Amino acid sequence: MMIQIPRGTQDILPEQVELWHKIEEHAKALCHLFNYQEIRTPIFESTDLFQRGVGDTTDIVQKEMYTFEDRGGRSLTLRPEGTASVVRSFVENKRYGLPDQPAKFFYNGPMFRYERPQSGRMRQFTQFGVEAIGSKDPAIDAEVISLAMQFYQGLGLKKLKLVINSLGDPESRKAHKEALVNHFKPSINEFCSDCQARLEKNPLRILDCKVDHDHPLMSTAPSILDFLNDESKDYFANVRQYLDAMEIHYVVDPTLVRGLDYYNHTTFEVMGEGFGAITTLMGGGRYNGLVSELGGPESPGIGFALSIERLILALQAEKVEIGQPKPIDCFIATIGERAKQEVPVIIYNLRREGISCDQDYMDRKIKAQFKQADRLNVPFVVVIGDEEIEKGVVNVKTMETGNQQEVEIQQLASYIKEHIS
Ligand code: HAM
């Protein structure tokens, strides 16, 4: 029986890989521009990290983690997101002690969530994310948001909507929490069992419930913005001022609570228009308590993550074409037995000179060899027959013009280098 790929995963085939490279290079160059440095953390971590970091009332921790016991009896989890790991590493490697603050990281790698697969929702997906840890300057909130916007715009996306909110500081959150409990408590029996459990523990999560999304009490729930204390209000106003000055357009949405527990103050998402059911391309926010929650000193942080899979859907929806596969420089077509014997060495020497090339390994007739060269879209076809071998020359055909030129074998590499545009 044929073995199939696991649900919610995908192969990225050679024709698509160039697009992935382009996106990764773009992300890397942009992070350099903003002075964010790459960090690579393990694919699996202690399960505790996500329970404490992401929060054990979240859907991610309750329903979506790939958790397993290793042979030593430890509970490990395939990372569902990158922030908790980056913060763990920041603490474990005592990066808070370095003079170079804030610490500005970026990452790009696979994440795993056991979700119901659909377009743009995978069980293995790739997140590009940034985390800036150590500063509570609202200017860095604006920097992180502007990096995300520049990332999308630089790839050619236009139909973007930036949504922002503030969840305030712990004091504001406490007041809002009480109001939420009072709002939902009388009718909590009408809600799912998860929401009932969330009522006392973390009522903010009720607002994020996928099951009770349309319950009338959702739209009338008290807004966090009405509970922000002066400090939180000022902070949010400062972030917005920076965004205004940068002419980054946004909409304030007081219902944007995000699906992870570590957030406070600024939260944001970028929505993409024009494809399937899923429109959130990116999400992020500030997490001032996470470093201390994971055993480090009080150290504020902010970041975002986005998946390359959803980005590619948005690029397709907006018909943005990038990442066409790059053809090799030339194809060697052979006629005759003697030429066939000599070509592997000729090709070996060309490659050593940095010329990308290939030859026929399928015993094709000359016409079919030219067809193969067409399929590869090469700029040059080098024809070598027994006669040419005798004379120490080859015939180079420039495909764009149809011109043919006899070239000495010794000069072949420099001829191609010279004529390639
Ligand atoms: P998140 O909202 O859970 O946040 O995920 C961020 C982004 O990852 C989403 O906007 C989406 O692009 C992508 N994503 C999430 N789940 C899937 C999935 N199943 N399939 C495809 N793409 C998906 C976080 O992960 C936070 N760590 C973001 C953050 C960084 N906050 C602060 N720093």
Image: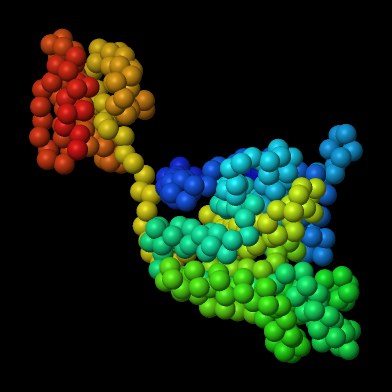
Q: On the rendered structure, is 198 left or right of 337?
A: right
Quadrant housing residue 284 = bottom right
Q: Is residue 285 above or below residue 250?
A: above
Q: On the rendered structure, is 93 left or right of 202?
A: left
Percent from the top left, x then y, of residue 108? Answer: 57, 47
Residue at 27% from the left image edge and 30% from the top image edge: 331
Along the viewing direction, whichever of 147 and 16 lies nearer the viewer: 147
Percent from the top left, x then y, of residue 100? Answer: 58, 43
Residue at 43% from the left image edge and 49% from the top image edge: 33
Placement of the N terminus among the 4 image quadrants: top right
Q: Is residue 317 above or below residue 306?
A: below
Q: On the rendered structure, is 73 left or right of 345?
A: right
Along the viewing direction, whichever of 325 and 289 lies nearer the viewer: 289
Residue at 44% from the left image edge and 60% from the top image edge: 150
Residue at 51% from the left image edge and 60% from the top image edge: 143
Placement of the C terminus among the 4 image quadrants: top left
Q: Is residue 136 above or below residue 165?
A: above
Percent from the top left, x then y, of residue 181? Answer: 85, 81
Q: For ligand 1, which image quadrant applies?
A: bottom right
Say whether residue 104 is visible.
yes
